[in-house]
Image: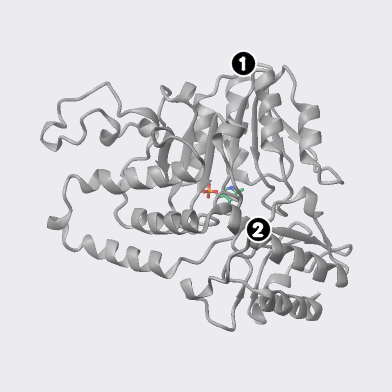
Amino acid sequence: MSLTNQRELFEIPDQITYLNCAYMSPLLRAAREAGQVAIARKSTPWRIAARDFFEDSETARRLFAELISADADGVALIPAASYGLSLAAANLPMRPGQRIVLLEDEFPSNVYPWRDLAARVGGSVEVVARPDDFDWTRTLLERIDDRTAVVAVPNCHWTDGSLVDLGRVGKRAHEVGAALVVDATQSLGAAPFDVGTVQPDFLVAASYKWLLGPYSLGFVYVAPPHRAGRPLEFNWIAREDSEDFAGLVNYRDVFQPGARRFDVGERSNFALLPMAMVALRQILDWRVEEVAATLGELTAHIEREGQRLSLHATPSARRAAHMIGLRSDTPLSPDLPARLAAANVYVSVRGNSIRVSPHLYNAAEDVDRLVSALAGAL
Ligand SMILES: Cc1ncc(COP(=O)(O)O)c(C=O)c1O
């Protein structure tokens, strides 16, 4: 079932056609309001109590866990996807000569930690070339073997939404003794995800795109076998009994339970957490399946209209519902995004692909505006 248009929940002026959620989502009105209230609290710190260092952190952890059908104990609060991926790279075992499998043209946050790990242990990074038929799953399955230590993949490619079947890839990875690490930044919130089905070792997501959250906040899910691992940094609140402010100098070796040991320092972010909580509640209220179905109708419309402009889309069977890449046979002009922006139409160009990423504030009229702006700008 599809959702009705939700534009009134956002603050997007009528003349703006914003089709760039994969770049950065707008805040919900309610999230901005929560953020403003939260910022104002810092002007009155006598109203910030010890329990406030814990309550929102736990609520955000729980809401994120609900979104991926995980236990809240498995979730840590992080500032960026790169932080979660670096945490995974610091904790996963890898022997000299082993390989880390990545997709071609992957987002750099999911490349640099693996290059570093490979260099440290004397292993290598193996990049799976972009298949002409967009079937990443087949090419990944062909490349995962007993030399593989880690498979670090998204569930859709950030440039065009082309899909990876994480269930099949994860199963194969685990069969050969490799770990599965998922960067879900470009899909969580708009594509259903269930940790029980995919069984990632680590899963990360920045919140400022499809989770409709603020910048500089993200989440990592850590599977049970890795929860006794080594944090990237050592902060006081991650230790047992940190709730007892008077006793903080009774230094502890024991951590807070579960993945809390991996929380970033100052994770009790008084300004950002309330915004993220509003957004997560809204997404859970919409239900991710419905968000995906609704955005799928819009991207199908974009695909049909793109064909009329000789733009070739990632085929629907091989892409996520919520975003679409439109490829041109001729090189795209570097100033295409600026020319579209001059017509108040916002998309991204990644490689030779025009990446169109709508959300529930978009309607069919936005697709019409995109098409007429593209017709004038290509
Ligand atoms: C696939 C993917 N992962 C992660 C990010 C953001 O990474 P970070 O939070 O490390 O800045 C982006 C941003 O475009 C992305 O497309």
Residue for badge 1 = 95
Q: Is residue 1 above or below residue 267?
A: below
Please identify the quarter of the rendering in which residue 249 is found.
top left
Q: Is residue 229 left or right of residue 107?
A: left
Question: 241 above or below 96?
Answer: below
Coloring scheme used: one colour
Q: On the picture, is 243 further left or further right than 284?
A: left
Residue 301 horizontal/vertical position (percent) = 76, 68
SS at badge 2: helix
Secondary structure state at the residue bearing disc 1: loop
Is residue 66 found left or right of 101 in the rendered image? left
Q: Quadrant of residue 118?
A: top right
Q: Nearer the viewer, mark 1 or mark 2?
A: 2
Mark 2 lies within 8 Å of ligand 1 (Cβ measured)? no
Q: Position of residue 224 (x, y in %)?
A: 46, 25
- The amino acid on which the numbered mark 2 sits, given as a three-letter code, is Ala
Residue at x 76% of width, y 80% of height: 372
Q: Earlier in the sequence, mark 1 or mark 2?
A: 1
Q: Identify which amino acid the numbered label 1 is placed on.
A: Arg
282 or 202: nearer the viewer: 282
Residue 293 got which mark? Answer: 2
Q: Between 123 and 253, which is closer to the camera in this rendering?
A: 253
Q: CA distance from mark 1 to mark 2?
A: 43 Å
Q: Residue at image x 77%, y 40%?
A: 136
Looking at this view, name the residue that lies furthest to the front.
Answer: 1
In which quadrant of the rendered view does residue 193 lie? top right
At 33% across and 31% down in the image, what residue appears? Answer: 234
Q: Quadrant of the N terminus?
A: bottom right
Quadrant containing the C terminus is bottom right
- Mark 1, residues whose alpha carbon is within 10 Å: few (<14), some, or many (≥20)? some
How far across and how far down the image is residue 89, in percent?
54, 29
